[in-house]
Image (cartoon, grey):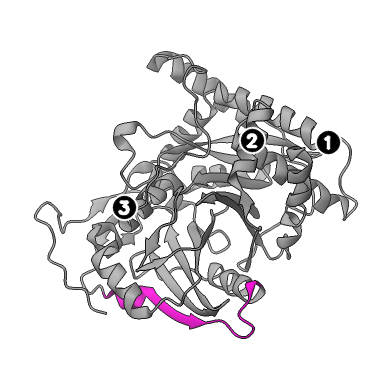
């Protein structure tokens, strides 16, 4: 499918330097931790390859970023985006079919297999897999390098190419009225203090959720959970939907470790949680603009209600801190320093956290993509550093799903972690 689009006069054919934050995610990549965001869309009706090609041609490729490839940098030369002179979008599209019976189990195997493959470094860093014979319809697997954009920016991109109706909500925000304005000097001082506290945190406890990762990944996703029920629980406990999400995740991890005889009464593990730092006037741009906080999940608390109250207390304290600003500055700094310092940052994630926990609010109303209504969506964020487990909440059209990605050597069956979400959700609803 050759694509001979004439470039807009404002688009330069010269290489474009990556931002420091985008370059940080590129530098963090390795054979065992590809920095690739994966999304899954399902359709009740079959989707044709021709319709998907038309969508790519007419909607996706109007953004020049999807015709550019990544050129890695060095200590003396920054990484850049460069137009792929021989770009043919057909090389980024794959057409496959599920083996019988074409159910969720077979789709899960295919998503896991696709996740385990590196993107072709010679091409623009994205690809689409059109999957036929899924549950009487089709599925679409989308893969995109994290250097292109973060989750919030990608939802806005989705809205722009599908005509989606709602704005994205970042995974963690600083609510209006709860966070006083501070000048740059005050924020800088608090950020340095937060970074110092982070560096002094002890390492996370050793459990079967941790281990040296390999290249094989495993993917799973939860059933659809009514978004209204999660909102009602959050409102009733003076918490946020993300607090409820973290509570459900902690419950799933608690039972997973209990089944293996590992869950002591006081066990806690930390999650790396993205925090959106975009200004409103920067909301529509691609790229990465988020920091990270380290949230302790109290797995020792058996009661979902008590666990939710404790997590809400902890997340509020993190929102009032400058930890996200500090980690964003640290990530940006990796684009300017030696490989040894870069390795230190990667090891920081691996030592002080067990999982990545992220949440993105998608379109509130159903969208059409390539002329067909998207029935459901889920996504998986890459694991930071050498963390072997990630859980991502995505809401779409009144429903929420949790995607779980794990290293096959760490958690061979991630579906076991989400199997008990429903029980805690039911308890919290009553």
Mark closer to the chain start, 1 or 3? 3
Against 330, is 382 above or below? below
Q: Is residue 92 magenta?
A: yes
Q: In terms of depth relative to the viewer, which is nearer, 135 or 78?
A: 135
**x and y, in percent, of residue 398 in the image:** 54, 49
Q: Secondary structure at mark 1?
A: loop
Which residue is labeled 3 in the image? Answer: 160
At x 74% / y 55%, what residue is drawn?
417
Does the residue at mark 3 contact the one at mark 2 (Cβ under 8 Å)? Answer: no
Q: Secondary structure at mark 3?
A: helix
Mark closer to the chain start, 3 or 2? 3
Quarter of the rendering occupied by the N terminus: bottom left
In the image, which is nearer the foreground, mark 3 or mark 2? 2
Which residue is labeled 2 in the image? Answer: 232
Q: In terms of depth relative to the viewer, which is nearer, 105 or 265?
A: 105
At x 54% / y 64%, what residue is drawn?
31
At x 49% / y 56%, what residue is drawn?
35
Quarter of the rendering occupied by the C terminus: top right
- Cα separation, mark 1 vs mark 3, equals 42 Å
At x 50% / y 60%, what residue is drawn?
38
Does the residue at mark 1 contact the one at mark 3 (Cβ under 8 Å)? Answer: no
Which residue is labeled 1 in the image? Answer: 303
């Amino acid at each position: 499918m050759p694509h001979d689009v004439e470039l807009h006069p404002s688009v330069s054919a010269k290489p474009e330097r990556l931002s420091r934050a985008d370059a940080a995610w590129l530098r963090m990549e390795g054979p065992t931790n590809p920095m690739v965001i994966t999304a899954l869309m399902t359709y009740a009706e079959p989707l044709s390859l021709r319709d998907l090609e038309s969508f790519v041609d007419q909607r996706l490729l109007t953004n020049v970023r999807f015709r550019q490839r990544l050129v890695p940098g060095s200590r003396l030369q920054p990484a850049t985006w460069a137009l792929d002179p021989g770009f043919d979008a057909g090389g980024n599209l794959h057409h496959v079919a599920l083996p019988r019976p074409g159910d969720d189990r077979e789709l899960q195997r295919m998503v896991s297999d696709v996740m385990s493959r590196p993107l072709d470094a010679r091409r623009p860093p994205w690809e689409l897999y059109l999957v036929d014979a899924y549950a009487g319809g089709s599925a679409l697997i989308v893969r995109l390098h994290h250097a292109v954009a973060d989750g919030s920016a990608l939802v806005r991109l989705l809205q722009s190419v599908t005509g989606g109706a709602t704005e994205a909500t970042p995974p963690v925000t600083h609510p209006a009225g709860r966070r006083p304005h501070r000048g740059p000097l005050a924020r800088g001082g608090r950020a340095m203090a937060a970074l110092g506290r982070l560096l002094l945190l002890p390492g996370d406890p050793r459990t079967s959720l941790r281990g040296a990762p390999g290249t094989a990944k495993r993917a799973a996703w939860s059933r659809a959970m009514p978004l209204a029920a999660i909102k009602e629980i959050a409102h009733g406990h003076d918490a946020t939907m993300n607090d409820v999400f973290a509570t459900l995740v902690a419950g799933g991890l608690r039972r997973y470790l209990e089944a293996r005889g590992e869950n002591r009464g006081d066990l806690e593990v930390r999650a790396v949680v993205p925090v959106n730092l975009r200004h409103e006037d920067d909301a529509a741009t691609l790229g990465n603009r988020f920091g990270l906080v380290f949230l302790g999940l109290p797995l020792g608390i058996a009661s979902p209600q008590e666990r939710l109250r404790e997590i809400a207390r902890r997340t509020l304290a993190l929102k009032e801190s400058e930890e996200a600003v500090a980690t964003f500055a640290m990530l940006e700094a990796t684009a300017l320093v030696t490989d040894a310092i870069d390795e230190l940052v990667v090891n920081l994630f691996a030592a002080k956290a067990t999982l990545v926990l992220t949440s993105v609010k998608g379109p509130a109303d159903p969208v059409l993509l390539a002329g067909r209504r998207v029935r459901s969506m889920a996504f998986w964020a890459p694991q930071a550093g050498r963390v072997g487990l990630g859980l991502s909440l995505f809401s779409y059209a009144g429903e929420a799903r949790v995607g779980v990605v794990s290293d096959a050597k760490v958690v061979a069956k991630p579906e076991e972690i989400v199997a008990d979400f429903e029980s805690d959700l039911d308890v919290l609803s009553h």
